[in-house]
Every structure is written in C-alpha cells, then in structure tokens.
Image (tube, coloured by chain):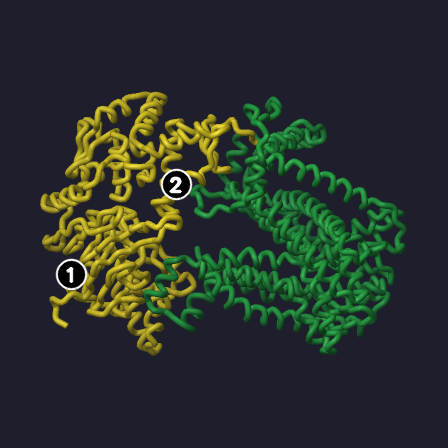
Chain colours: A yellow, B green
C-alpha cells in the first residue's frame, strides 16, 4: 500500500431512521463521500444534530450505514476492526479497572500475552504523561488525566486511524489546549504509529489549530457542504491575521443557508434557544462597539459561546425576524431593536406577535386549544403530528422549545404533570395544600 | 406569625362532568362501601379457639381477597406512620441514632413468622371476645415484614437532604410540621414509594402465611386467601389451590395498576433533579384521575379537611415551636453523659441476654441449644446453595435482557410482578408433587425457599445491565472485547453492585421463607426437611414459647452474622470499586 492511497474511503454513505407512523424515513446523513489519506488530520465540523457523531460510529463499525459503504484499506467495514480506534467525548473508561488495566484491555482482547501487554501499556502510559498513575482508578483522576487514559487506551493498539469524537469538549479550556498540544507534538514528531487522525468537533478554533483539512457538514440532513484545506504551519497562532481570516471564512460557510429562513410548516425544527439567550445576543449586537452589526467570530468571542450554542440562537433570531445573518455577519432588524428597547410586559407582547406570525406551530397550538371544549389539549396530540416528519426525540425537543417560548409570550399555559396545554393562566389549577 | 388558613380550593369555573366521571364515580363509591363492609367484618365477635368456617366455594374468593387486601392496607398505613416517627427520631439525635439504626438492622433479620406465634396470644388477650385479636396479630406480622426497609429508606433520604434546603427552610422560619410536609417528606418520596412497593411485594407472602395461625395446637383461620389455601391443602383440593392462585394474581394486578403505577408516576415529580429525564413513568389510572373533572373536585376534599380538621390543627400547633436558639458549635463534649449512656445501654443489653437465656433454659438444655445451632447450619447450607444456584441462572439471563432495551421494557414489569406474587400459594402444587412421587423432602423442599425471592436477583441484574452507559459499551466494542473477556472485564463488574442488592434480598427472603418451606403438609401427609425453619415451625405449633424464642434468636444471629461477614463486606467493596460515579 503506497502513501497516496486512501486509508478510509466513504462512498455515498447515508443513514436513515424509519419513522414509526409514516412511510417517509428521517434522514440523518445523506450521500457522504470523502476519503482519509495517510499523514493527514481531518476534522469534521458541524452544528449539533448534523449527524457527525453518527458518521464517526459508522466509520468505526459501531453502527451500520443505511446506504453506501465505508472502506478501510479497501475492505468494507461492517463491525469494529483492529486498525481503527476511538477516543470518546465522555472518556468511556471502565470505573472498576485501574489506569493500567483500562489501557491493557484492548491488547487483552487481541490475545497478546501478559508480559508484552504490560510492557506496551507502560510504554504508552509513559509517553502520554500518565506515569505514576498506573494503579489509580479513573474516578481519582481529573478530567484531563482521564482523557489521557482514553488516548493511551486508543493508541496502545497501534491503530492506523485514530478517531476522536469531541475528545476535548468535556474538558475546561486550558486543560483541553494542553492535551491537544501534547497530542499534536506526538503526531508531528512521529512518536505514535498512527497514520491518520479523523476528528469530529464543533469548535472552529480547535479544529483550525490542528487539522490539515476541514470537512464542513450541513444539517437536516447531514451532508458535506464544503471542504477546506488548511496549509498553515505548526505551531499555529490563533491571533495571526491568516488564522482569523480562516475563522471568518468558516463562519461564512456555516451561515450560508440554501433554504428559506421562514418556518415552512408546523414541524419546522425549532432551534433550542432560550429567550434569555436571544436577549443576550441582541444586547451584545446593539452594544456601541458593534452598532447593530457584528462579526460572528467576534460575537462568539465576546459572549464566549461555542458554535453549538451560538448557531441555534442565530437561527431563532432570524426565524423570529429579530436579526439577519449573512456571510458571517449578523445585523439587528428594526423589530429586534424594538424588542430590545421595550419593557418586560411589552417584550412579551412583541415576542408573542412574532411567534404567531412566523412560527406556524405556535398558531396551530393556539387554534387547537381555542376550538376544543374546556380550552384544553393534550400534548400527545401535537407530538403525534410532529412525529409525522420528525423522530420521537426530535418531536419532543421541538415541543419543548415551543412550550418555553409560548409560556414566555403567555400565549398558552402548559401543565407539566398532566401534559395538557390550556388557555388558562397558570397557577389557577387546584393544588393540594 | 400565623398564615391565614387557605380558602377551600375550588377549581376555577365549573366544568361539566365528562365521560370519565360516569365511569369513575361508581367505582369510588363501590370502593368506599367495600372498605366499610370489610372493616365491620373484622370486629365480629369471636371466642379464641372457636372454628371459623372457611368454604372452598370459589364465589367466596373475591370476598376473601378483599379481606386479605384490607389487612395489607392497614399494615401499610401502620408501617408508614412508624417510618415517619422512627426515621425522624433517628436523625434528631446522635444518641437515638446510635441505638435505632443498628436496632433496625437486627429487626430486619428476625424471622417474621416467629413473631406471630409470640404476639398472637398477647393480642387475643387485648381484645377478648372479638376477632380483632387474631386480626391484629396477623396485621402485626405483615407490619414487621414491611416497616424496616421503609424506615431505612426514609432515614437515608433525610440524611442525604441537601443542607441548603434546610437552610432555606430555617431562613423562612418554617415550623417543624411545615418543614416535614414541604421539605422532608417530598424529598424522601421517590425512594419511599419504591420501598413501599418492595414492602408490599414481601407483605403478600406474610399476609397469606399469617391468616392460618396455629398456636398451641389451636388453629385460627382468618377469612382470607391464605386460609382458603390452608383449607384446600387440608382437603387435598388442587383445583381450589388453582382458584386461589388466580384470585391472588388478580389482586396483585389490580393493586399494581390502580395503586402503584399511579403512585410511581406521581412521585416522579419529587425527584431531585433539574434536568427532565426522558422516560417519565406513565399510568393510565393517574391520567384518568387527573382528567376527570368531578373527581378533581372530590380530590380537593381531603386537602380541605386537612386544613380544617381540629386534631390536625392541634398537632400542627404542637409542632409550631420556636426554632431552637443557636448554640456555640462544636458543642463541648460531655464525657460524663456519654459514658453514662454507654453504661445504661450495656446494662440493658446484659440484662436482656440473661433474661432470655433463663427463659430458654427453663425448657431447653445446653445440648439442645447446640443442636439448634446445628440445625441453623443446615438451613444456612440450603440458603447458600440455593442463592448461588439462583444467581448462576438469573445473572446471565438478566444481563442478556438488560442489554436489550426493548426486551427490558417488557420483562422488567414481569419480574417485578413475579417478585410480588406470594410464592407460598404455589407450595401446595410442588408439595403434592413431592408427596405423590415420594421424593426426598430434605432436598426437594429446599427450592421452595427461593421460589419467590429469586426474582429479586433477576430484577436487579436487569436494572444494572440496563444502566450500563452507552460509551462503555461502545468502548468495549471498539476495542473488540468479546466473549469471556467481555463478561469478566465489563459485564460482571457492571452488574455486580445491583446484583448484591438482589442477592441480599433473595437470601434474606430465603431465611424468612424457611419457616414455611421446611415443613409442608399435603392433606394428612407431613413432609419435613431438618433445619432451623422446621424447628421454629414445629415448636410454634406445639406452643412451646421458650423454644420458639430460642429458634428465633439463633436464626437472627445467623442472619446478622452472615450479612455482616458476607453481604455487607461485598457491598462496601462494590461501592468503593465498582460504582459508576
């Protein structure tokens, strides 16, 4: 096998889930084509819910693709294979095994004799900076040290391909940066035999610090939106103008949407954003520094928001016509300005008006409540409607969002215990003493 | 300061009765009528020793089932009251805690049916000429099978209650009464509800066993399913046994649907968590109650009475004491009071030991005491072997089920249901088989001991396997850990802590069941397996109280020592090493 031939190749990979009631399937991933070549670090970037973690699990054989193929060294992957190992976001360490036993587990599964196992595990533990902790249990370690065990365990089997599923996002910023730099050093100095790394992340800067190539995924359904080669030399400086330029370029790509910004039907996937978050972002844009017009990367920095948190907020602001987002910039709309300037009661009114005008689901719920005797309607009714085109979990999430928004705007009341929507004001329900 | 009493709560706006009202109201009134009738029957006049006619007519079974259920309900209420008082007392003072909690531990290990023979005469003397005496004895036996673990659960919840909530309660000057109902009881509710379910499961066993009381060669048959089956055994009527089993199945199914599911669904709101869990418990009956307009108004009645009733108000007043003034902390330790306290405890312990020994020695010789200990070894061997066998069978099955979420959803309620079914109802079926085939009772009676309790192992192992986090499963798959290595390194350690809970319950239940399982009758045939349980049962029938006391004491000792040396140590190990944090 020569060095230019792909280690991993994805051909038209799709993932669908069967909707229980209707014939139409829910598509999570659609026609993913891409290849991983020796010597490169590739990052898959996308918002939450774009199926990037599912993609990683398909690649390493933990779940199967609905259509298409994953080839590893020209062999289709249909179950976990020896050459691909993974580092998990939540570490995935066995709490009843010591650091050493956790690291040895993969070798044990391969049937390697005990003395060799021990020696190889100790060598990796040493390399990754865990020596002294061999006999510790995971619960005794800090998050950063736990993830080092995760890396040691993945690396000890000498994998060709190392997959990282949001490997740094459960760690605090300084810890994540240290671990990332250590890993990058091992890679650059060729201390690990790993031939390629594929990482999934939602951190734009994190990805730009290490990746040679970035694949940006679109969501609903997840498909490749753009590919970007990063030719910056290591060590990279995240304050350098070239770097900042790339950050903005990625924001631009990620905010270019092909579709309509209006909610098209009642089962529009409402973004998970709270009203307080919307106000926070609007407040920041209207700050004199920005004057109603801000750079997304600057906004993310100022509010210390990750892409995963920021994008749902942006989407909600656009949906409600409080702001426009284009080419990596956000601009406050006149409505947004009015909403921001109003007092608490007036804000609720404006929010309610926009909700009814722009979000069909809100109007639908209000109409149904109105038509029913006793002005009450069970949530199961709406969930069933949503599940026609959304998965069960997604339908519940969307309903959660509209409950939160509707309660704020006082469009309707919702009783958690009974799961009933009503027109009554909350608090008038009989309560036991 | 006193809040004005809240006005009676009336739902806003009158809602016309809906369909559910029409279905439910007759149900409610019917239940009230049955309750009144049942309690009236309980106080019927009765002379101790007079035979109570029990008929094997299956049409009488609903009536018997009702009486059995009523006993269970009363015992449960008593247990609840006991739980509140005992647990509150235990957390209120360090000295009380020092006695009450170990005491609870020992009480848990006393064979419950042993209690019955000693207490029944006492209760009969209390209510001369009334059926209430034997009724109370039976209810007391059920109470002893339910109360201890409920009290433990409540005690632990109170100990775990977050400090900041207490501080809030004190800051707002809640009285002890308010604090109990607004803070402590709700916080403990999910754990308590779960333990109530477990208690009732165990209680069915004893409600059935305690209805046919044989003391001093006199048999009292309290009308109920247990007596029905006792008569059926006496007449070798397998068909009647079948009817009784069906009736019990119906009772358990009904209580599960009408009481426990609604209770669990309702208690879910008290879970101390700020993130909503995905799977909230569901109950069609609770939905029905919540959707029924008239019933909702009816439900506000107890709340209104609670607010207005004089006795409740008086109790409330009593608890409305000013909060204790702050004292310097740490309080200066008083070595004097402490040693005095220890001295007092020590002397009480020594005195009781001396008294018990003298009581026992009036009848039994030293050699017999040694023999009883030997019998205890036989029963211990049975308990150990059967618990091991049940574990070997149900652990792999439980893991296999627990790793399949869909299957778990279906099997889990079934396992819970099976553990609630009183296995002693099935004994006649097995015993008639052993008797007709002339099998060796020493061996073949033994499985009866775990017949009912093995399900706890299955149930807990399923729960443990189902709780295995998906990232651990994926990590194992990614490292290609399979076969024996997977069981050794991943699956067994993962389910071990929950297995222990199941194993402890199963072995404790087996000790308790030995009293009814080691001696079995089928008509005039009596099968005996030598062991401590048989000894207690036989001495009870003979009314030999010193020997019964000896048997109970020895069995408690065995259980306590066995639990301390084995289960508790394993449990501590599992908590330290294996717990998922």
Q: Which x, y percent locates residue B239?
A: 74, 63
In this rendering, the answer to whether A359 lies above or below B77 is above
Residue of label 2: A385
Residue at image position (83%, 49%) is B133
Q: Position of residue A127 (x, y in %)?
A: 25, 65
Residue, disc 1: A40
Residue B165 picture location, percent across and down = 51, 38
**Discs 1 and 2 lie in a common subunit:** yes
Please state which of residues A239 and B426 is positioned toward the viewer in this rendering. B426
State the image quarter where residue A155 is shown: bottom left
Looking at the picture, does residue A280 appear above or below residue A249? above
Query: Of the residues tagged 1 and 2, which is closer to the observer?
Result: 2
Q: Earlier in the sequence, mark 1 or mark 2?
A: 1
How dense is the environment of label 2, judged by Cα within 10 Å: few (below 14), some, or many (20 and up)?
few
Q: Residue at x 25, y 29 (%)?
A: A322
Q: Point out the image quarter for the C terminus of chain A.
A: top right
């Amino acid at each position: 096998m020569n060095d230019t031939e792909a280690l991993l190749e994805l051909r038209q990979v799709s993932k669908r889930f069967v909707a229980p009631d209707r014939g139409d399937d829910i598509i999570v991933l659609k026609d993913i084509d891409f290849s991983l070549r020796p010597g490169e670090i590739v990052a898959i970037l996308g918002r939450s819910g774009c199926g990037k973690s599912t993609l990683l699990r398909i690649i390493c054989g933990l779940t199967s693709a609905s259509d298409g193929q994953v080839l590893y060294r020209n062999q289709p992957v249909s179950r976990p294979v020896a050459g691909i190992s993974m580092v998990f976001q939540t570490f995935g360490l066995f709490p009843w095994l010591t650091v050493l036993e956790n690291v040895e587990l993969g070798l044990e599964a391969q049937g390697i004799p005990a003395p060799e196992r021990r020696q190889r595990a100790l060598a990796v533990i040493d390399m990754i900076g865990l020596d002294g902790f061999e006999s510790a249990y995971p619960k005794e370690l800090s998050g950063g040290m736990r993830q080092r065990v995760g890396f040691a365990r993945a690396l000890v089997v000498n994998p060709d391909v190392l997959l990282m599923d949001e490997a740094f996002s459960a760690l605090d910023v300084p810890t994540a940066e240290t671990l990332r730099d250590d890993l990058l050093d091992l890679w650059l100095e060729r201390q690990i035999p790993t031939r390629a790394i594929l990482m999934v992340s939602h951190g734009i800067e994190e990805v730009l610090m290490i990746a040679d190539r970035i694949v940006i995924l679109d969501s609903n359904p997840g498909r490749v939106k753009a590919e970007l080669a990063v030719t910056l030399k290591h060590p990279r400086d995240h304050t350098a103008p070239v770097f900042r330029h790339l950050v903005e370029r990625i924001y631009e790509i990620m905010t270019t949407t092909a579709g309509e910004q209006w909610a098209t039907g009642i089962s529009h996937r409402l973004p998970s954003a709270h009203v307080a978050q919307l106000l926070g972002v609007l407040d920041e844009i209207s700050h004199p520094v920005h004057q109603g017009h801000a750079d997304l990367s600057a906004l993310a920095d100022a509010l210390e928001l990750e892409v995963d948190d920021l994008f749902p907020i942006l989407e909600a602001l656009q949906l409600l016509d409080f702001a426009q987002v284009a080419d990596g910039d956000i601009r406050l709309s006149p409505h947004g300005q009015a909403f921001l300037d109003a007092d608490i009661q007036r804000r609720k009114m404006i929010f309610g008006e926009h909700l009814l005008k722009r979000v069909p689901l809100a109007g639908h719920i209000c109409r149904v409540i109105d038509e029913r005797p006793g002005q009450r309607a069970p949530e199961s009714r709406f969930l069933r409607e949503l599940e026609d085109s959304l998965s069960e979990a997604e339908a519940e999430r969307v309903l959660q969002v509209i409950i939160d928004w509707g309660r704020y705007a006082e469009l309707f009341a919702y009783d958690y215990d009974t799961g009933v929507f009503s027109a009554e004001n909350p608090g008038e329900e009989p309560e036991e003493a | 300061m006193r809040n004005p009493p809240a006005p009676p709560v009336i739902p806003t706006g009158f809602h016309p009765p809906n369909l559910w009202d029409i279905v439910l109201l007759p149900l409610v009134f019917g239940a009230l009528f049955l309750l009144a009738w049942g309690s009236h029957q309980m106080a019927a006049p009765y002379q101790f020793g007079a035979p109570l006619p029990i008929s094997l007519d299956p049409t009488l079974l609903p009536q018997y089932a009702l009486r059995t259920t009523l006993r269970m309900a009363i015992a449960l209420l008593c247990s609840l009251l006991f739980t509140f008082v005992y647990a509150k007392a235990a957390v209120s003072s360090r000295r009380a805690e020092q006695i009450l909690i170990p005491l609870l531990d020992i009480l848990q290990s006393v064979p419950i049916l042993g209690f019955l023979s000693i207490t029944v005469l006492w209760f009969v003397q209390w209510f001369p000429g009334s059926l209430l005496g034997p009724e109370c004895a039976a209810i007391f036996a059920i109470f002893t099978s339910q109360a201890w673990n409920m009290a433990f659960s409540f005690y632990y919840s109170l100990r775990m209650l977050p400090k900041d909530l207490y501080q809030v309660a004190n800051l707002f000057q809640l009285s002890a009464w308010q604090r109990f109902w607004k803070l402590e009881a709700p916080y403990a509710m999910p754990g308590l509800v779960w333990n109530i379910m477990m208690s009732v499961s165990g209680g069915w066993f004893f409600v059935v066993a305690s209805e046919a009381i044989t003391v001093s060669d006199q048999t009292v048959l309290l009308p109920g399913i247990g007596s029905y089956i006792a008569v059926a055994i006496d007449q070798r009527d397998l068909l009647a046994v079948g009817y009784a089993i069906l009736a019990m199945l119906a009772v358990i199914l009904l209580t599960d649907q009408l009481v426990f599911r609604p209770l669990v669904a309702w208690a879910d709101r008290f879970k101390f968590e700020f993130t909503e869990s995905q799977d909230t418990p569901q109950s069609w009956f609770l939905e029905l109650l919540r959707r029924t307009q008239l019933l909702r108004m009816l439900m506000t009645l107890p709340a209104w009475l609670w607010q207005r009733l004089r006795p409740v108000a008086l109790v409330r007043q009593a608890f409305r004491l000013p909060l204790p003034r702050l004292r310097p902390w740490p309080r200066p330790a008083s070595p004097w009071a402490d040693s005095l306290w220890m001295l007092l405890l020590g002397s009480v312990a020594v005195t009781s030991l001396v008294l018990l020994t003298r009581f026992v020695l009036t009848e039994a010789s030293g050699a017999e005491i040694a023999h009883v200990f030997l019998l205890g070894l036989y029963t211990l061997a049975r308990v150990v072997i059967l618990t091991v066998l049940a574990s070997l069978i149900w652990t792999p099955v439980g893991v296999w089920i627990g790793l399949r979420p869909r299957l778990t959803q279906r099997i889990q309620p079934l396992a819970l249901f099976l553990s609630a079914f009183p296995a002693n109802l099935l004994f006649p079926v097995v015993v008639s088989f052993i008797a007709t085939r002339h099998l060796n009772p020493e061996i073949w009676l033994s499985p009866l001991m775990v017949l009912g309790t093995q399900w706890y192992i299955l149930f807990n192992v399923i729960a443990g396997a189902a709780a295995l986090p998906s990232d651990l499963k994926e990590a194992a798959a990614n490292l290609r850990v399979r076969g024996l290595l997977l069981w050794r390194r991943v699956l067994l350690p993962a389910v071990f802590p929950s297995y222990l809970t199941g194993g402890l319950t199963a072995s404790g239940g087996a000790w308790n069941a030995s009293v009814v399982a080691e001696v079995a009758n089928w008509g005039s045939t009596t099968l005996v397996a030598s062991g401590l349980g048989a000894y207690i049962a036989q001495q009870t029938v003979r009314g030999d109280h010193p020997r019964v006391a000896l048997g109970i004491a020895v069995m408690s000792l065995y259980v306590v020592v066995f639990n301390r040396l084995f289960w508790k140590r394993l449990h501590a190990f599992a908590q330290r090493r294996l717990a998922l944090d």
